[in-house]
Image (cartoon, rainbow, N blue to C red):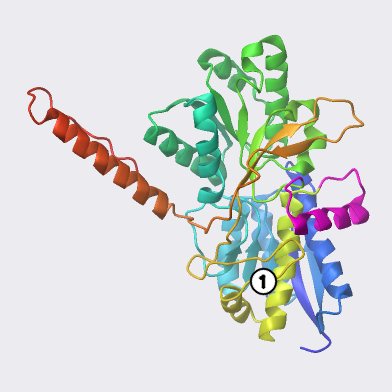
């Protein structure tokens, strides 16, 4: 390994409808590669092989295949969407490569060729709903981009609401990049939900939030402090693009720039030195950054860049990074993460003030990954059994219609 140069694919969309977060991912990975190569911790260097899929799902597999077949990349840092991740799986299987996937996603997957360092459902939507439902109510309007992320996140939301005797007042999807959302606003006006769960991404989400901002200015009942918008993927990188319309959005993330813990304070300071004081540090930047450092530490510890060796070692030891140690579960290959919840503040102020997330659960603790929500379903089944017993006792001495208990998956 001494003196060797290891090619690593960096696959993010820097152009297209969700390019804001793509550029963040690219910058995070490239910043970490530069730090690793400039460090005296390693006896090898990483060579970035970059490509821009331009937010077109079909391009991801083509470019990943080229990275692995032509450029000899055993590892790829990348993908922003579940659609693109799914496209890569057959390529990874063919070349026996490893994808480091560092964005939040909908779960219900555990592939041997993927390290999942982004939040899965028990680390994003579940804690977000637990926080929100007691405060704002249980009547929701669900939106999403028309692919697996939107479908699955809203399916989980439906089940969480059903378990709490909540209601879904509407569920609507638009194509990736579509900014014609007037029909969504009309339905929200008609249904008047307690909150909106927004799983749109990129330009679609930005247009939707701006339209909601306009609606709130016309009718106070739709202001974010009364009818909030929830998100599992909004980050600091997008706040300057959205502007005042981001004010009050409540998002969950495994990383916020404003999270107060010792390593983050130093990390944010260093990233501001590198990127500028007015550039936010987001999960979309930090995730790939941490993945590169974790990969380098695994290669160093095992003395091998072979994807199988790296994967096996990564699940057996904590991987030190400047943001904090990364712990990968051996069974699911998902990371243990802390689900912070933050509300956007400062977006509606003058342009001299940079919007940021105020963390509302600073005492949040790290959660082991549960991508299939096995533990959640076990807890729910136990509650249902208690409810069934109570119903049986109540109705044991009465005559009437039979009682049916709806079991939610």
Q: Which residue is found at the position 56% from the left and 57% from the top?
A: 86
Quadrant occupied by the C terminus: top left
Judging depth in this view, the residue of 79 and 62 nearest the camera is: 79
* Quadrant assignment, res 182: top right
Residue 69 in sight? no
Whether residue 246 sits left or right of residue 401 in the image: it is: right
The magenta stretch spans residue 393: no
On screen, 99 above or below 84?
Answer: below
In the picture as drawn, the residue positioned furthest to the bottom comes out as 2
Q: Main secondary structure of the magenta part?
A: helix
**Label 1: which secondary element:** loop
* Quadrant assignment, res 5: bottom right
In the picture as drawn, the residue positioned furthest to the top comes out as 218
Whether residue 58 sits left or right of residue 398 in the image: it is: right
The segment highlighted magenta reads: 258-280
Judging depth in this view, the residue of 256 and 290 nearest the camera is: 256
Q: Which residue was labeled with disc 1? A: 319
Residue 99 lies, in percent from the top left, at 63, 66
Q: Which residue is found at the position 77% from the left and 55% from the top?
A: 264
Residue 1 lies, in percent from the top left, at 76, 88
* Quadrant assignment, res 131: top right
- Local crowd size for mark 1, using a 10 Å CA cut-off: few (<14), some (14–19), many (≥20): many
Judging depth in this view, the residue of 394 and 121 nearest the camera is: 394
On screen, 301 above or below 288?
Answer: below
């Amino acid at each position: 390994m001494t003196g060797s140069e290891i090619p690593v694919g960096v696959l993010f969309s820097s152009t297209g409808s969700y390019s804001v977060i793509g550029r963040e991912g690219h910058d995070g990975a490239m910043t970490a590669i530069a730090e690793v190569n400039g460090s005296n911790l390693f006896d090898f260097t990483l060579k970035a092989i970059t490509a821009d899929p331009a937010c077109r799902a079909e391009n991801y597999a083509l470019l990943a295949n080229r990275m692995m077949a032509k450029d000899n990349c055993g590892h790829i840092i990348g993908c922003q969407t579940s659609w693109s991740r799914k496209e890569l799986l057959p390529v990874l299987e063919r070349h026996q490569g490893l994808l480091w996937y560092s964005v939040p996603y909908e779960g219900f997957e555990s592939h041997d060729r993927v390290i999942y360092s982004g939040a899965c459902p028990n680390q994003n939507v579940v804690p977000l709903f637990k926080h929100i439902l007691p405060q704002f109510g249980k009547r929701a309007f669900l939106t999403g981009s028309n692919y697996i992320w939107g479908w699955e996140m809203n399916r989980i939301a439906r089940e969480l609401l059903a378990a709490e005797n909540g209601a879904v007042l509407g569920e609507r999807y638009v194509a990736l990049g579509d900014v014609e959302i007037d029909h969504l606003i009309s339905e929200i006006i008609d249904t008047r939900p307690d909150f909106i769960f927004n799983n749109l991404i990129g330009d679609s989400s930005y247009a939707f939030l701006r339209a909601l901002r306009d609606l709130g200015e016309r009718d106070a009942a739709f202001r974010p402090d009364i009818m909030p918008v929830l998100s599992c993927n909004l980050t600091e990188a997008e706040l300057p693009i959205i502007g005042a319309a981001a004010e009050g959005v409540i998002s969950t993330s495994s990383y916020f720039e404003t999270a107060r813990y010792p390593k983050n304070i130093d990390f944010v300071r260093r990233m501001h030195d590198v990127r500028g004081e007015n550039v936010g540090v987001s999960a979309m930047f930090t995730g790939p950054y941490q993945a590169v450092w974790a990969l380098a530490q695994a290669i160093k510890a095992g003395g091998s860049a072979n994807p199988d060796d790296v994967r096996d070692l990564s699940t057996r030891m904590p991987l030190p990074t400047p943001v904090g140690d990364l712990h990968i579960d051996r069974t699911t290959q998902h990371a243990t993460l802390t689900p912070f919840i933050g509300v956007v503040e400062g977006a509606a102020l003058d342009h001299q003030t940079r919007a940021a997330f105020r963390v509302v659960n600073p005492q949040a603790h790290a959660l082991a990954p549960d991508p299939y929500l096995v533990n959640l379903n076990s807890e729910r089944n136990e509650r249902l059994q208690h409810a069934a017993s109570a119903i049986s006792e109540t109705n044991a001495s009465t005559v009437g219609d039979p009682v049916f208990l709806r079991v939610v998956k």
